[in-house]
Image (spheres, coloured by chain):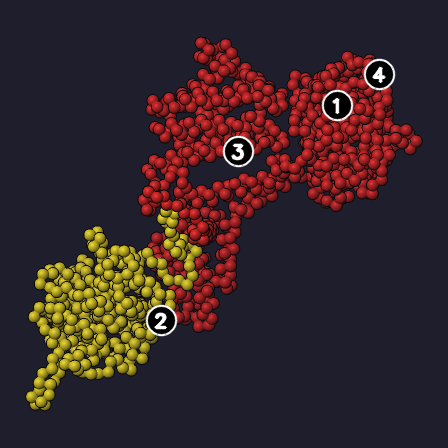
Chain colours: A red, B yellow
């Protein structure tokens, strides 16, 4: 009883330690007090029931009751009778809290404040885990099973955080689990009584037992596998290990101080994106059902250091602002929508974020102006922190077919002159030349460039890639193919300009993943950059080349579909691709693009069939797994073939029953005795392996003759002559001056194997075929002897060390009495 | 009487088939008298061919003497029978020099031991003095009387019987003498069918009377020569040594088998192999012989005796523990090459 009490307390402690990862979820520590209370109540209930010698079901019931009481007390909110006894109202309240927690999970971003629903669900979850751990560890005495509920807690922060999480709470949890395992084990050993050495010395409880060598081996293998396995899995490269050695990037300080709008938007973007903190920046609501990104800045000048922003120029905002440059509303369907934006103190810029082409601004002072060229709202005096405003805007809904009608701009066109200048870089020119070779219209050319940034072409998202948009940086990116939105946007703009079309980089927010009751909450993690290309008659058309999977709330309009999306039929994506360009429409762009690219890039059929990488990974994994599983069988068949080739020396028919006396003199050889001996040994080894495969015990104290007789007596109904022949052959090879001619041994082995297989049941037969015990046993013995040799060596080394250091040991001076 | 032992026959071995045919004839001949005891008969023959001596130990009336006599009769050679009694004198066994008044010389009158086959009945009833008279002739195949040494004929074999029950007034064989017997066998009761058949066979007369010799002394010497030429592989020799060493190291045995026993074990194994139609010895031969050849030489500890463990059981268990000889170590042999140290003892 005492040991169980102790183990129960350990289980409670373990549960608390295992709940450490929850600290990553909450901002505060209220959850911890709740957890302490719940775990304490559960453990207390379990202890009490156990001291009353309650059965397992009674313990479970008591723990659940304690859990319910605790929850009622904490979250009953006045619905409980006497503050403790749950009433139907309490249950209703719990249901409401549960559904509330669901909404909170959807709407909040970690770390979360102390929200009622989340606190409730975490307290209930930890309490439930405490019940399960106690049940597994103490009542059922299966502490290893208790790891499963704890694993549930582990998985919560891992699932919530997209990027890496601090490993510390997980280590704490793991230590707790180990504590539980060790306590249980010590308790088990104690029940046998005290341990003594051979000389009668008492052994301390914590001193490892001789059996611990196996445990150490297992633990080493487990840890090595746990560390190495994730490294082998794709897309986990950035994680715990990727954390080290990365700087925080540039400027956390987005204050609109100097030079007003001449903010280095790129530095701002990468710095804010890489910040470990998550800050709410903007809250937006809109009447638009499918809005594009919220936009606040543009970089449309190219210098030595790459793209930069110009000084904007425009009129103060008002109710009737000019249409964006170049957009001809007769060409395109434009939807007029209204949006409301609240900017937090975290976003302090001389620019305010707006959707698409704002035409009417409200509740914004006269300090703000609108540049119809850049389509940005800027101020020379104020910044955006704390602003709240409303505006109407136009969202043009282009279609690929409409855009295809756009003609190339005249060289004299001011937009063409201003926004297609770009430093000439040979590599980019070659690439652009190749990608746009036989594209007719400007739109198809842009699509050719845009589609190039796909995972098929090994482009990957890496937020930690070096920043920069200069020619060298663009070349680095195009060669390394790893970067984040900044690189993708700048590279596409650079390439479009190289192709002779106007392009620029736009900055703003992707729509994020916190859409709740019509409000998008956007954080610094949602900051984004994309490319805009100018088409005659359509104005600036956005293209987002960044892999959509890595942009939370990415939008892929019909004219710039997700290049990494699996090929779906057009009908299955009606909302996004009304033009049908998202699928393998024979007439549409993507298919042609794929084929063209396949030819151009020399990737052949792989590029054309477009199988996603994960398929290859899982196929490869399955193959490796299959190989590992098939290794014993392969090894066995290899062994058999090697022996068989040398035993049979050709194709000999199986030995017929009732063959001549095996020891007849004409069967003995006079030629190469050693070769005949070797063949007989090989045949015998094969027979022994076959016996082990079919679960016939092998005794090293048995002679070949006796082995064969036992085999015939116990297992064999046919092929007795063949078996005897093998026995005689091995016996003669070992002990006689002249061995037996080995011609028929291969056939004999085969007939014995067939006879054994015929007599065995299906399970044994399958095991012999797929997981031959002989090979497994050999491997196991090899491992055993290797580890035994290693431990013997280390023991010898230790003893030598003791011998060497003995003279150095300081003797305690004897005290005079 | 001082014939040269052996002769040219020893260097003229038979073929395997010839050997088999001859020995089968002897066995078949003996089996006319002793029914259903093929293994015992073959073992007795093997001891003869291994130039050893046989001790048959069993209760009265199971055919000990009959076996000895039948074996003797099947071979055309001299046979003497000594009935050991407490008053038997050593000179009755070895022979005595008497004064010949005609020639005025002492003349050696050979004793009962001067024969090819000596059947010593109830050997444990003779006094130790008489028993030890047998010692020299058994091991050295010679008799020394009054300083004169007389060599025995070949083949020479002593078949002694003794009764393990009714030990009153007996002198149990000393260790030294027991060691000189190559093998000790027990007859055992015949099974019911054999006993029934015996009733018919012995109805009118003793079939032993009808037994005629099937081989002569020269043939037996050739047989012995053939046995000597049987091949023994190195691994088998090693196994014999290991087996005998194991008896010395076995914790249940106070006295292990002697080096002489190793020699006799291997020699008998050769004979058994030849009887089996082989020209080489296999470990199986040693395994089957371990109990008859070694069991009467070892002495169990007091603990084993208290536990009622017979030497036969101890030895057969030993045989089952010892791995058979092989050039290569089996990949499935998990026994460590050296015994591991105890973990705690190493640390303590």
Query: Are both tags, 3 and 2, on one chain?
Result: no
Seen in the picture, residue A161 relative to B296 is either above or below; the reply is above
Question: Which is closer to the viewer, label 3 or label 1?
Answer: 1
Question: Which is closer to the viewer, label 1 or label 4?
Answer: 1
Mark before the other along the chain sequence, 4 or 3: 3
Disc 2 is placed on an element classified as loop
Residue under pointer 1:
A255
**Residue A288 at x, y percent in the picture:** 73, 18
Query: Are both tags, 4 and 3, on one chain?
Result: yes
Seen in the picture, residue A711 relative to A649 is either above or below; the reply is above
Residue under pointer 2:
B231
| Count of all numbered marks drawn on residues in the image | 4
**Labelled pair 1, 4 in contact (Cβ < 8 Å):** no
Q: Chain of mark 3?
A: A
Q: Chain of mark 4?
A: A
Classify mark 4: residues with Cα within 10 Å, few (<14), some (14-19) or many (20+).
some
**Residue A264 at x, y percent in the picture:** 78, 29
Residue under pointer 3:
A171
Cα distance in 3D space between marks 1 and 4: 22 Å
**Labelled pair 2, 4 in contact (Cβ < 8 Å):** no
Seen in the picture, residue A639 relative to A389 is either above or below; the reply is below
Residue B284 in view, yes or no: no
């Amino acid at each position: 009883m005492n040991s169980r009490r102790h183990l129960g307390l350990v289980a409670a402690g373990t549960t608390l330690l295992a709940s450490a990862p929850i600290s990553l979820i909450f901002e505060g520590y209220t959850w911890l007090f709740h957890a302490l209370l719940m775990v304490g109540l559960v453990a207390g209930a379990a202890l009490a029931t156990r001291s009353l010698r309650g059965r397992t079901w009674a313990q479970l019931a008591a723990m659940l009751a304690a859990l319910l009481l605790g929850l009622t007390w904490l979250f009953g909110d006045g619905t409980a009778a006497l503050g403790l006894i749950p009433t139907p109202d309490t249950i209703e309240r719990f249901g409401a809290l549960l559904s509330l927690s669901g909404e909170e999970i959807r709407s909040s971003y970690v770390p979360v404040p102390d929200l009622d629903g989340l606190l409730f669900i975490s307290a209930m979850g930890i309490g439930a885990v405490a019940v399960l751990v106690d049940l597994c560890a103490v009542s059922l005495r299966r502490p290893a099973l208790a790891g499963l509920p704890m694993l549930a807690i582990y998985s919560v922060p891992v699932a919530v955080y997209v990027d890496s999480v601090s490993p510390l709470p997980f280590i704490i949890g793991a230590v707790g689990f180990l504590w539980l395992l060790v306590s249980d084990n010590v308790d088990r050993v104690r029940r046998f009584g005290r341990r003594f050495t051979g000389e009668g010395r008492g052994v301390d409880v914590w001193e490892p037992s001789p059996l611990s060598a196996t445990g150490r081996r297992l633990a080493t293998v487990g840890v090595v596998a746990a560390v190495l396995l994730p490294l082998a899995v794709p897309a986990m490269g950035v994680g715990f290990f990727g954390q080290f050695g990365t700087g925080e990037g540039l400027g956390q300080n987005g204050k609109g101080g100097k030079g007003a709008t001449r903010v280095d938007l790129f530095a701002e973007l990468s710095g804010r994106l890489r910040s470990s903190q998550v800050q709410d920046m903007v809250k937006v609501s809109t009447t638009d059902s499918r809005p594009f990104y919220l936009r606040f800045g543009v970089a449309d000048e190219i210098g030595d250091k790459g793209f930069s922003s110009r000084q904007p120029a425009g009129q103060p905002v008002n109710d009737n602002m000019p249409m964006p440059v170049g957009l001809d509303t007769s060409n395109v369907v434009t939807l007029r929508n209204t949006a409301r934006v609240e900017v937090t103190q975290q976003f302090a810029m001389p620019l305010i974020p707006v959707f698409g082409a704002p035409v009417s601004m409200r509740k914004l002072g006269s300090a703000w102006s609108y540049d119809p060229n850049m389509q940005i709202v800027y101020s020379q005096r104020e910044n955006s922190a704390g602003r709240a405003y409303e505006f109407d805007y136009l969202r043009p809904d282009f279609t690929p077919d409409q855009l295809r009608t756009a003609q190339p701009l005249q060289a004299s066109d001011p937009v063409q002159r201003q926004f297609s200048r770009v430093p000439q870089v040979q590599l980019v020119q070659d690439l652009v030349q190749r990608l746009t070779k036989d594209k007719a219209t400007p739109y198809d050319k842009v699509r050719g460039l845009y589609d190039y940034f796909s995972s098929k072409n090994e482009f990957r998202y890496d937020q930690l890639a070096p920043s920069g948009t200069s020619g060298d940086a663009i070349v680095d990116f195009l060669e390394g193919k790893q970067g984040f939105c900044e690189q993708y946007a700048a590279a596409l703009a650079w390439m479009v300009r190289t192709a002779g079309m106007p392009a620029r980089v736009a900055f703003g927010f992707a729509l994020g993943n916190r859409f709740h009751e019509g409000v998008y909450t956007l954080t610094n993690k949602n900051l984004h950059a994309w490319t805009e290309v100018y088409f005659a008659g359509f104005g600036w058309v956005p293209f987002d080349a960044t892999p959509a999977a890595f942009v939370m709330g990415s939008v892929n309009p019909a004219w710039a579909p997700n290049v990494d999306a699996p090929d779906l039929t057009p009908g299955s994506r009606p909302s996004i691709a009304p033009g049908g360009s998202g699928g393998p429409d024979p007439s549409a762009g993507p298919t042609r693009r794929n084929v063209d690219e396949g030819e151009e890039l020399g990737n052949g059929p792989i590029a054309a069939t477009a199988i996603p990488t994960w398929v290859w990974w899982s196929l490869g994994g399955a193959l490796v797994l299959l190989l590992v599983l098939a290794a014993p069988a392969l090894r066995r068949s290899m062994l058999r073939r090697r022996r068989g080739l040398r035993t049979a020396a050709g194709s000999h028919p199986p030995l017929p029953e009732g063959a001549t006396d095996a020891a007849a003199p004409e069967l003995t050889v006079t030629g190469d005795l050693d070769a005949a001996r070797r063949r007989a040994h090989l045949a015998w080894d094969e027979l022994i392996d076959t016996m082990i495969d079919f679960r016939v015990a092998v005794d090293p104290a048995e002679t070949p003759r006796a082995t064969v007789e036992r085999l015939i007596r116990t297992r064999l109904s046919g092929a007795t002559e063949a078996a005897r022949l093998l026995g005689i052959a091995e016996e003669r090879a070992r002990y006689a001056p002249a061995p037996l001619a080995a011609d028929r041994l291969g056939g004999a082995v085969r007939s014995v194997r067939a006879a054994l297989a015929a007599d065995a049941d299906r399970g044994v037969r399958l095991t012999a075929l797929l997981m031959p015990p002989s090979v497994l046993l050999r491997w196991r013995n090899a491992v055993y002897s290797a580890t035994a040799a290693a431990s013997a060596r280390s023991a010898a080394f230790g003893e030598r060390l003791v011998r060497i250091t003995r003279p150095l040991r300081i003797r305690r001076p004897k005290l005079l009495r | 009487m001082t014939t040269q032992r052996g002769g040219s026959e020893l260097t003229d071995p038979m073929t395997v088939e010839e050997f088999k045919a001859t020995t089968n004839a002897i066995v078949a001949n003996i089996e006319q008298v002793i029914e259903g005891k093929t293994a015992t008969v073959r073992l007795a023959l093997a001891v003869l061919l291994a130039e050893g001596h046989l001790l048959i130990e069993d209760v009265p009336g199971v055919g000990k003497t009959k076996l000895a006599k039948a074996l003797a009769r099947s071979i055309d050679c001299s046979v003497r029978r000594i009935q050991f009694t407490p008053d038997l004198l050593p000179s009755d066994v070895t022979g005595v020099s008497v004064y010949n008044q005609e020639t005025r010389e002492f003349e050696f009158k050979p004793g009962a031991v001067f024969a090819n086959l000596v059947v010593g009945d109830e050997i444990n009833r003779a006094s130790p003095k008489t028993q030890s008279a047998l010692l020299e002739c058994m091991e050295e195949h010679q008799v020394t009387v009054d300083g004169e040494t007389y060599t025995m004929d070949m083949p020479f074999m002593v078949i002694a019987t003794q009764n393990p029950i009714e030990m009153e007034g007996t002198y149990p064989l000393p260790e030294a003498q027991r060691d000189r017997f190559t093998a000790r066998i027990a007859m055992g009761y015949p099974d019911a069918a054999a006993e029934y058949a015996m009733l018919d066979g012995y109805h009118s007369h003793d079939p032993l009377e009808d037994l005629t010799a099937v081989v002569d002394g020269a043939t037996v010497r050739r047989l012995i020569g053939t046995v000597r030429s049987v091949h023994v592989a190195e691994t088998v020799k090693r196994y014999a040594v290991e087996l005998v060493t194991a008896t010395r190291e076995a914790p249940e045995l106070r006295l292990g088998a002697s080096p002489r026993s190793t020699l006799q074990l291997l020699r008998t194994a050769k004979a058994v192999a030849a009887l089996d139609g082989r020209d080489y010895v296999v470990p199986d031969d040693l395994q089957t012989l371990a109990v008859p050849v070694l069991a009467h030489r070892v002495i169990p500890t007091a603990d084993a005796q208290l536990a009622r463990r017979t030497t036969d059981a101890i030895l057969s268990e030993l045989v089952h523990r010892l791995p058979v000889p092989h050039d290569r170590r089996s990949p499935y042999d998990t026994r460590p090459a050296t015994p591991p140290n105890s973990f705690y003892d190493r640390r303590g």
